[in-house]
Amino acid sequence: MITSPNILQAILQAEQKIRPYIRKTPLEYSHLLSKKTGSQVYLKLENLQCTGSFKVRGAMNALLSLPKEQCGTGVVAASSGNHGIAVAFGLNTLNINGTIFVPEHTSSAKLAAISKYGVYTRFWSTDCLETEMYARSYAEQNDILYLSPYNNVHVVAGQGTIGVELCQQLKHIDIVLVALGGGGMISGIAEYLKTVFPHAEVIGCSPINSPVMAKSVQAGQILEMESLPTLSDGTAGGIEKHTITFPLCQRLVDDYILVSEDEIRHAMRLFIETHHMLIEGAAGVPLAALLKMPERFKEKTVVIILCGANISLETLKTILN
């Protein structure tokens, strides 16, 4: 595993590399959520990021870090959607070839977003981890670089630039709530954030239907678990064994909160109705965690990472109805 100082250095390098290609997203104070919880709630609007998700940070950093000879060969990626969109955006922007494998149940909105960049897409399996493992095997067999959505130092460092921005945007942070899937975003944010605010808590938020990383950290080893359907498709599925994010989550994440599908749905609807912006299921998870345990956050300065907005019309209808 890469050591902490090296990750910090990689995050700072990523901040310089990707800045021309991404947005410094707004940090918005939420009067409604602050009043509801008795805390000071700020929303990091990664739902307004290029490609509609934070994932573009890690994907662009990884692609910009490729050696020149690898750029000619191209890359292979696997994704339930947002990582695929981000990689497709990066490949198109940097004129690099690539193939993206997606699970068969991938959101139609996310598939459409990938296809507009003209990157070749292939379906494999209905489980995110199985899709990842096949894509990695395909890459090895064809001597092509596999670009993991989380198990990659450059990806973690790219996501860590969210932490850099937060520390520029707020003078004090008590708690950050982050949707947790493979752990790339939460690891990167926490690694940088805790150097500026060492007493800040970073809390991983997952759907009850797919809490793989949270349960794995609790068990002390990466577990093989069946994931049930969830609105939070961006965090769903298993995680690779030996991923660099597992020990990072063990060391850096202070607590875990699990939320139900009804709680996610309610949080998404409340946000869409009152803040007049779209968010996807994964972004609804930390919102649901805040609303589930308001006493946990009372009189604290809380940041919620709204990680994406790529929601299909079909799913949006179920939320609003």
Image: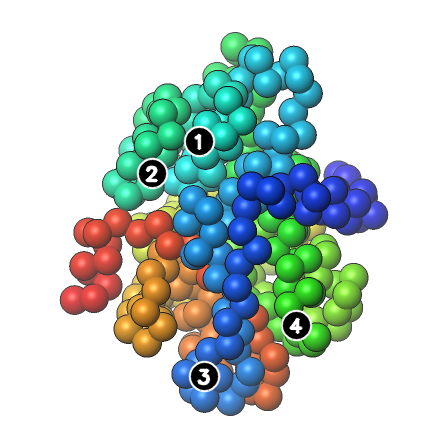
Examine the rendered structure and indicate whether residue 176 appears above or below residue 73: below
- Determine whether, in the image, residue 19 is placed left or right of residue 278: right
Distance of label 1 from label 3 (alpha carbons): 36 Å
Q: Which mark is residue 88?
A: 1
Q: Name the spot of residue 240 as percent of width and height, x first.
A: 55, 36
- Identify the mark nearer the N-term, 1 or 3: 3
In the rendered image, which residue does mark 2 sit on? 113
Between 244 and 28, the one nearer to me in the picture: 28
Residue 19 appears in the rendering: yes
Q: Is residue 150 visible?
A: no
Which label's residue is closer to the chain start, 3 or 4? 3
Q: Are marks 4 and 1 in contact (CB under 8 Å)?
A: no
Mark 2 residue type: Ala
Quick one: label 3, few (<14), some, or many (20+) residues within 10 Å?
few
Query: SS of the residue at dot 3?
Result: helix
Give the Cα distance between marks 4 and 1.
Answer: 32 Å
Q: CA distance from mark 3 to mark 4?
A: 16 Å
Identify the residue at horizontal 68%, vertical 65% (top origin). 168
Secondary structure type for disc 2: helix
The residue sitting at 57% across, 36% down in the picture is 60
Which image quarter holds the N terminus?
A: top right
**For marks 2 and 4 on the same chain, the one whose residue lies earlier in the sequence:** 2
Q: Quadrant of residue 274?
A: bottom left
